[in-house]
Image (cartoon, rainbow, N blue to C red):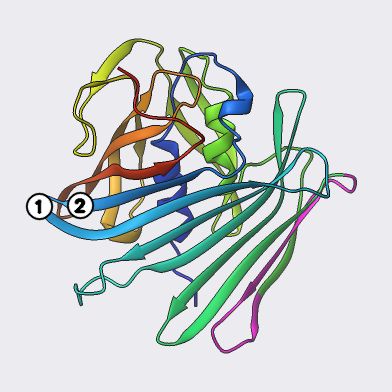
């Protein structure tokens, strides 16, 4: 069965990767983007996250976004292995999830959860299938609200990061509706990462989660993002039950992008 907290974790991780300055939107939804992050507790690597973005060549304004979240296999006390896929439409400055799929791998078996957004009929169809291939949830949520899923909110926030205010964004998590608190700021700062030889101009974000998720994620979080057109997530700090963990950009593919000076 899928972890009850997987969407809360991936959504919060993704929310840490926002900036708050208006730039070209085409640089955020970038065909062929690959971003790889390590997850560390103190000096111990406990896992990694990789995001990719691909433009659908057959459907106008459609993008296929993917995230892979995996724990360090040498650590027996942590077992995290998820794939997330979000099909999104982007037009007129707005982003809409079309279909979201989450897959968990555990003990050589997999379970899945799918959100199918039916805007013309004003509902979302949710199906969860356990690792025994049996349907565990099959339900309809009726609403005219445009919800973000656990992966599309990453791109939603990057595309709407020209704000200096606190927002509550409607999202779908754990098969139900919720709101995520985001405290945007357009104040410029800087941040260091191991894979850059200089301080990187950045903007800063803070927020709060009142749940416990994968890796024991709970409470306060903060993040830094490149102060340029690409708005690349650079670094994030999260509070967990055992202390604090850090996510840091380790490798990237985004055209000719390099950390700005």
Q: Which mark is residue 76?
A: none
Q: Classify residue 121 as left or right of residue 85.
A: right
Who is closer to the viewer here, 71 or 124?
71
**Where is residue 144 shown, x and y percent of the image?**
79, 39
**In the image as oriented, which residue stretches furthest toward the left?**
43
Who is closer to the viewer here, 198 or 146?
198
Q: Residue at x 22, y 61 (%)?
A: 46
Q: Classify residue 185 as left or right of residue 128.
A: left
**Where is residue 137 shown, x and y percent of the image?**
65, 72
**Where is residue 85 shown, x and y percent of the image?**
60, 57
Q: Residue at x 20, y 77 (%)?
A: 76
Kindly check if marks 1 and 2 are in contact, taking CB atoms under 8 A apart as contact: yes
Magenta highlight on residue 44: no
Circle 2 SS class: strand
How dense is the environment of label 2, judged by Cα within 10 Å: few (below 14), some, or many (20 and up)? some
Displayed quadrant of residue 145: top right
Cα separation, mark 1 vs mark 2, equals 6 Å
Circle 1 SS class: loop
Judge whether residue 12 can be spotted in this image. Answer: no
Residue that numbered label 2 is attached to: 40
Q: Which mark is residue 43?
A: 1
Q: Quadrant of the C terminus?
A: top left
Give the residues drawn in magenta, as a range: 120-136
């Amino acid at each position: 069965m899928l972890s009850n907290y997987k969407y809360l974790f991936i959504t919060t991780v993704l929310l840490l990767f926002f900036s708050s300055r208006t730039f070209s939107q085409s640089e955020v939804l970038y065909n062929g983007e690959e971003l790889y992050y390590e997850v560390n507790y103190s000096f111990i690597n406990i896992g990694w996250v990789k995001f990719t973005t691909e433009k659908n060549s057959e459907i106008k304004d459609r993008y296929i976004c993917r995230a892979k979240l995996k724990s360090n296999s040498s650590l027996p006390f942590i077992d995290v292995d998820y794939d997330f896929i979000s099909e999104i439409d982007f037009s007129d400055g707005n982003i809409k999830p079309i279909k979201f799929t989450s897959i968990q791998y555990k003990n050589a078996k997999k379970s899945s959860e799918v959100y199918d957004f039916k805007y013309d009929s004003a509902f979302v169809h949710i199906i969860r299938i356990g690792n025994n291939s049996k349907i565990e949830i099959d339900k309809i949520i009726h609403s005219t609200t445009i919800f973000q899923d656990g992966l599309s909110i990453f791109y939603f926030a990057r595309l709407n990061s020209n704000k200096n205010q606190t927002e509550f964004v409607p999202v779908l998590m754990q098969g139900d509706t919720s709101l995520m608190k985001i405290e945007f700021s357009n104040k410029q700062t800087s941040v260091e990462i191991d894979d850059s030889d200089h301080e990187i101009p950045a903007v800063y974000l803070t927020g709060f989660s009142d749940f416990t998720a994968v890796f024991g994620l709970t409470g306060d979080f903060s993040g830094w993002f490149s102060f340029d057109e690409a708005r690349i997530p650079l670094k994030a700090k999260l509070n967990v039950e055992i202390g604090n963990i850090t996510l840091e950009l380790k490798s990237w593919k985004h055209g000719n992008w390099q950390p700005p000076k």
